[in-house]
Amino acid sequence: MAKIIVDGVEYEVDSDNNLLQECLSHGLDLPYFCWHPCMGSVGACRQCAVKQYKDADDEKGMLVMSCMTPATDGAIISIKDQQAVQMRERVIESLMTNHPHDCPVCEEGGECHLQDMTLMSGHNYRRYDKKKRTHRNQYLGPFISHEMNRCIACYRCVRYYDDYAGGTDLAAMASHNHVYFGRHQEGTLESEFSGNLVEVCPTGVFTDKVFSQRYSRKWDLQAAPSVCTGCAVGCNTTPGERYGELRRVVNRYNSEVNGYFLCDRGRFGFGYVNSAERLKVPVRQGDGQQEELDANEAHQLVQRLDGKIIGIGSPRASNESNFALRNLVGDDNFYAGVSAKQHAANQLILELHRDAAFHVPSVREIESCDAVLVLGEDVTNVAPRIALALRQSVRNKAKELAESANIPQWQDAAVRELAQEDRSPLAIFSNYASRLDDVASDTVVAGNQKLVKLGSAIAAELAGESASAGLDEAERELIGRVAQQLSSARRPLIVAGSSARSMELIKVGANIARALGKRSGNVIDFALLLPEVNSLGLSLLVQKDKDLSAALGVMESGAAKHCIVLENDLYRRAATSEVDAAIAGVDSLIVIDQLATPTSAKADIVLPATAFSEHEATYVNYEGRAQLSYQVHRNHSAARPAWRWLCENPAQQVEELVDRCAESVSAFKGIASLLPDLNSMIAGMRVPRQSHRYSGRTAMKAHVNVHEPKQAVDSDSVMSFSMEGIPASKDATVLGASWAPGWNSNQSISKFQDEINGKLKQEHCGELLLKDKQASGDFFNVTADQSDANNGLEVLPAYQIFGSDELSAHAPAIRERMTDAYLSLSPQDAEQLGLKHGQGAGIAGTDYVAIVCIREKIQPGTVAVYCGTEINPHDLPERIVLNANADIAERGIRGLIVSDLLEESY
Amino acid sequence: MSEMIATSGVRPRQLTPEEIAEIEHEMTLYPDKKAVGLEALKIVQKHQGWVSDESLLAISRYLDIPAADLEGVATFFNLVYRQPVGKKVILFCRSVSCWIMGCESVRAAIREKLGIDYGETTADDEYTLIPVPCLGDCDNAPVMMVDEDLHRRLTPEKIDAIVAAYKDANDQGKGA
């Protein structure tokens, strides 16, 4: 271990890092702007200057930029040196010559890194009294506001947006004191990760537009650690609430999952929580009549149902709610609320999880893989945060080159300059061109049959068998290349999942991973993507044969008297006619949900449920990681957590339920460890959700009553709806909004990390439930289904980050980015069918109409169908016939981002 | 490169065969297409007089460089014109040597003669006046360049003659 001396104190450091990172890792206060833990150093802002001395006798020393200086053994530096202090102050002063005095009206105020650094550097009086340069701001879409006058030109935004996230439509323009960061023309920022600009920008140039519409200072928000429910990745978030409204979602650091970044669905998709369409009271309905029920009466009604009850669970409901429903109806009567095909895929994925030959990697682990094959997944639209990780994985080649050239990894500009376009291999086999294609080494766009054929050939090649049957020359070359890349990689990764709705593709992925494992003797990284936040948790609670088709069959046959549907819209899970018939077969249908759905419209009893930020719950992500999400704020309607409707005791505490689940379901054994023990907290004091600066507590209800009401008591958790208690600055076990003295911005997270980019001090990364592996299985025998290729086009499901997720599609900001249902066709098929881009097309045999989108790379004979909110995908046969239908003039697919649109289609 | 479908907005124009030939030539001199961005902008400016949005998008499309990145290059160099300029561009030095030697009076003479100041173009689209930091000819200050011609030791009086000479040359060109 290397040692350095900072202001006379010796610290142990990792000499592979730079001085700035090591100083911050040791909790020292040293100002910086352009450096970011995920993006390394470029030495652009000159803010982190320190004095470095040659040896103990050197009294003069020289100023160096700590972010650009390696932490070599024996280095002697001073942060407190007067010259260094003065330099840092002057740097800020020069930045401030152009920075406006608008903190009171700036959304960044109170969590501004520039404010923190200005104070830290000691610059507190402005001498410059001349004109400041001003800029015109741009419209950047529904998510991000732009205020360029505040810019200090640290270049972090473009380094994040372009270099890290692969965006192409934000750049640095012009030069010297009028550098401008913006788009070529006004318009929506195209990157699916644009929201991170809000947190990456050290000041208020890029701010959260959704938050601005109903704004509060950071210290006035009630916040708690939460988990994003937008997809199966399970990113950690900190939602903030004020006046009973969820105001915003920001990233919460988790070293293993999302690190410092979220996707835009996760950040801006919460708006449905505040929706006026939320269900608020229990109702009994029928014959066009609605009758409000008393909450206790409704609870009793559910508990006293007589006759056979079946329960249909949900992949978007928590483990606790699914478990409570299972308890109420009995294991044998509990069904997964997902289609038969999805359920089968989930069960297969579960089986592969337990196979000793495979390891399902975390997002962080994915970043370290150096050869990747994606099979049939549109990762950007299904598991966006993983797409961002895959984009980092291709940079391992650059890191390798840097290492051999003796360039430290943190020398960002040098490493990029050295590597140029050299990337680690990423082969993408998908149904339609994806947003990761720009960094892919090989792409194949084809229907599932062809993908299965090519994938099987790779598996055969890796297993040393002949792989060339039925392949042309180019395909043989491709197969050989991909197989070679995977087998020679240090850490290869296969990405597959359920999105292409093909069991064969998952099996092919498993065969490739298994062949790789047999060759190298290693456990192979095999990322299995699932669609929803708790897809895996639900699968662990349901018996293998209990899919939705089985449930609908039981209902239709009249064998079940009552059916309880938990947070689920059956019309998204099975064909409309089947659901209709099933509902007609039961005496009563009880639906528990947050928003009204076509299913709740048919229910006899509808019970309102709380949303993710209104209850404490656990979810299991795609890798089997169970994570605890705390309640952030209270719901003031009669809505209850779904499990509270379902448990016999209406005062049931969630922690007891978690414990019971851990005891009675073997897969959930580890889940109880997620619950922090109040007794382990200091003096049994609770963790406040409100900051110590939380204002207006005595006044915020004064328009109702001037007496301050008693603070609500949270019986469920170790957190309180209050400012009192022991805040996370003492113990990061329960860390919502991070804050440290002098560090009001999100950069304060470094004060809670073991080391920069490392785990949090009181490690809480969730609990991996599927650690116990079974013996590794055998190769699957895969045969591609030979469906009749003459009749119509093969339907391939298409996904959109904004729209494919049921709940976030109700958020106003997300709605602005959603497109209507569309049909992606090859130019050949479109011509043959006489269909034009942007025109409507009817799907034969159904009433559905969607917009034609002609894309160059779609395989002729296939059609990628994005169902949006209009089409029930289960109503579509496997092959469809299209006919021109002009009745669609009002709709559009504006905002769709594709790489292979034909020029004449614009 | 991915792109958002938008129903309105500027579309790229068609590059001319001459422009394409010259850009293709430059591409043989660099390791990748990205590196040719600046040269392509200069080529288009040579043929079109300036770089319009349509031209910028055309280059972006042709070289597969994001429009934003190319705009970054175009705006970094102040001699890549993103607005129409006159047939002749006057690069007028206003750095310290020229200032000491009285360039402000020459500037006033130009304003008087042509009716334009920094950043402006004459109504007949003949001249655009652009200030530059230094032309590297300080011993002959004040100096300015009109297209490729360097004019030295300027005085307000000389401006009349310079403009007249260009007018003559222009008229002769038209006559022939």
Image (tube, coloured by chain):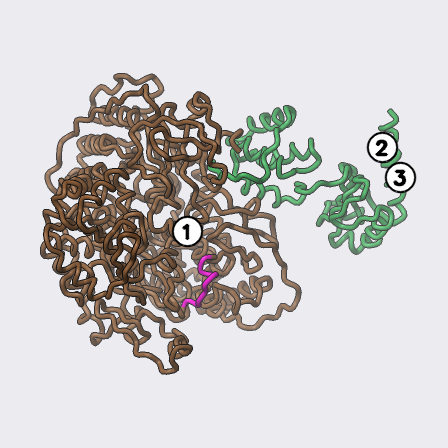
Q: Mark 3 points at which residue?
A: B164
Q: Nearer the viewer, residue A668 or B109?
A: A668
Amino acid under label 2? Asn
- Please name the color used to draw chain A: brown
> What chain does mark 3 sit on?
B
Position above or below: A355 against A863: below
Q: Residue at x 43, y 60 (%)?
A: A54
User: Vertical placement of A759 versus A800: above or below?
Assistant: below
Q: From the top left corner, tell me how far across and down residue A64 is, in percent.
A: 47, 58
A167 relative position to A473: left or right = right
Q: Residue furthest bottom?
A: A707
Image hue for chain B: green
Give residue A680's quadrant in the image: bottom left
Where is residue A354? Give x, y as percent. 15, 42
Earlier residue among tags 2 and 3? 3
Counting from the top left corner in percent of width and height, residue B150 is at 79, 40
Q: Residue B170 carries which label?
A: 2
Q: Which amino acid does label 3 sit on?
A: Ala
Q: Is-magenta flag for residue A217?
A: yes
Q: What element carries label 2?
A: helix
**Is residue A635 visible from the viewing direction of this image?**
yes
Q: Which residue is drawn at 17% across and 71% down?
A: A679
CA–CA distance in space, label 1 to label 3: 58 Å
Q: In which quarter of the image is the N terminus of chain A?
A: bottom left
Visible residue check, residue A400: no
3D distance between C-alphas at marks 1 and 2: 57 Å
